[in-house]
Amino acid sequence: MPRVLLFSNTTGYQANAFKEAAERMGISISLATDRCHVLEDPWQDGAIPMRFEDPQDSAEKIADFAKRHPVDGIVAIGDAPTMAAAFAAKRLGLPYHPPHAVDACRNKWIARERFKAARLTVPWYRRFPTDYDASMAANEVPFPCVLKPLGLSASRGVIRANNKQEFAAAFDRITKLLEAAAIRISRLDSTQWIQVESYIPGQEFALEGLVTDGRLKTLALFDKPDPLEGPFFEETIYVTPSRVPSRDQQTILDCAQSAVTAIGLQHGPIHAEFRFNEDGPWVLEVAARPIGGLCAKALRFGDSMRLEELIVRHALGENIAPIKREDSASGVMMIPIPAAGVYEGVENVEAAEKVEGIESIEITAKLQQKLVPLPEGASYLGFIFARGPSPEFVENALRAAHSKLRFLISAELKVV
């Protein structure tokens, strides 16, 4: 029986979705995670304890495991596990993204350097040590600009500054965020820098794809219809297929392939973010992993195949070239956290679920959970999924459903 090894630092929905996909396919899946000392053996399947901050040591543990349980394919979800997966694949001689490419995906400075060397369109950019004087740095950058941690994802810590005062405040705020123990342990090499880039105007897009021998197959191009202009860049709605003209879509796809080549990605899923304006497409970032959290539920392929199954089949060497996304439009809304506080519950879920086109509403926030919005936060209140005859229909359904939800937040029971 073929075996896939899944690198994941959680055992939530996304990991369980891969397990379910493997069960449907009749193959074995084993979990490599850095949480086993807490969760013990969550799947009762001999989960392999990892230290993702030491990927080469993790690769040696995988090599020992593979002597007893041969591994036929490797998949990683989330940013932290991708480097361990890359070293393990190299150690076992399995197809995957090489370590140097994964490293570039996890470091915005390295990625920008690769894109520039490949003559892709890049903004002005520079990195500053976190101990650099913020007021001095403000004299050395163009405005408006965007400040970014080198190694965080999902817009965490990303702040726009329009003047020197906003820059200094954003610089200090990101520095404090990077001092958090959990972040420093996992990415010490990138927590000592802040990258500054000139602000790129235009519409934003997300691309989901699979790379085989360095060639990108685009699975979906998502429009992000909400304006993402700052000061923070919290993502909300993804809708596919894209509504921009086909010639503009093709330039984004061509840019994505160029970015994949520039970074050196070879085999496995990618999730990429772009801006598009009168100068064409600009790569914001490319991640060597699939779309995160519950968002993959917005995608179906062929005869209702889920993204996780498609990724597993690809990891095992199957030809996925003929497989296409379903004809229906689909989308997801990541429900933003509007304010810091304590989550007390949600009302009107049933009414929101009755909106035409809504498939499901998943509230992932837990009662009494402390809520932290962007730019420090790294989670959402939940997800809304819709499917329908057109992207416009899907977007309208998502907005209508969200407008009906009433979230109760904080000790003073503030209704938003």
Image (cartoon, rainbow, N blue to C red):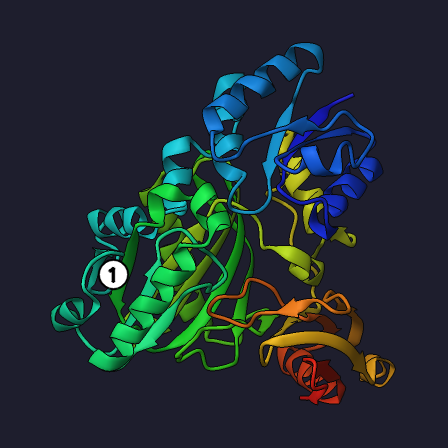
Please tell me which residue lies in front, 327 or 76. 76
Left or right for 74, reference 36: left
**What residue do we see at 75% from left, 50% from top?**
305
Whether residue 337 is visible: yes
- Rendered location of residue 132, percent (x, y): 19, 59
Tell me the kind of residue under disc 1: Val
Please tell me which residue lies in front, 385 or 366. 366
Q: Quadrant of residue 70?
A: top right
Vertical order, 29 against 143 (above or below): above
Location of the N terminus by quadrant is: top right
Q: Report the number of discs.
A: 1
Q: Secondary structure at mark 1?
A: loop
**What residue do we see at 50% from left, 63% from top?**
206
**What residue do we see at 66% from left, 85% from top?**
399
Please tell me which residue lies in front, 350 or 169. 169
Label 1: how many Cα within 10 Å (few below 14, some 14–19, many 20+): some
- Rendered location of residue 29, percent (x, y): 74, 30
Q: Residue furthest front?
A: 411
**What residue do we see at 76% from left, 24% from top?**
46
* Residue that badge 1 annotates: 122
Location of the C terminus by quadrant is: bottom right
Vertical order, 230 against 256 (above or below): below
Please tell me which residue lies in front, 40 or 263. 40
Q: Quadrant of residue 295?
A: bottom right
- Rendered location of residue 391, percent (x, y): 63, 77
Whether residue 356 is visible: no
- Rendered location of residue 283, percent (x, y): 35, 60
Left or right for 176, reference 298: left
Left or right for 408, reference 216: right
Left or right for 224, reference 124: right
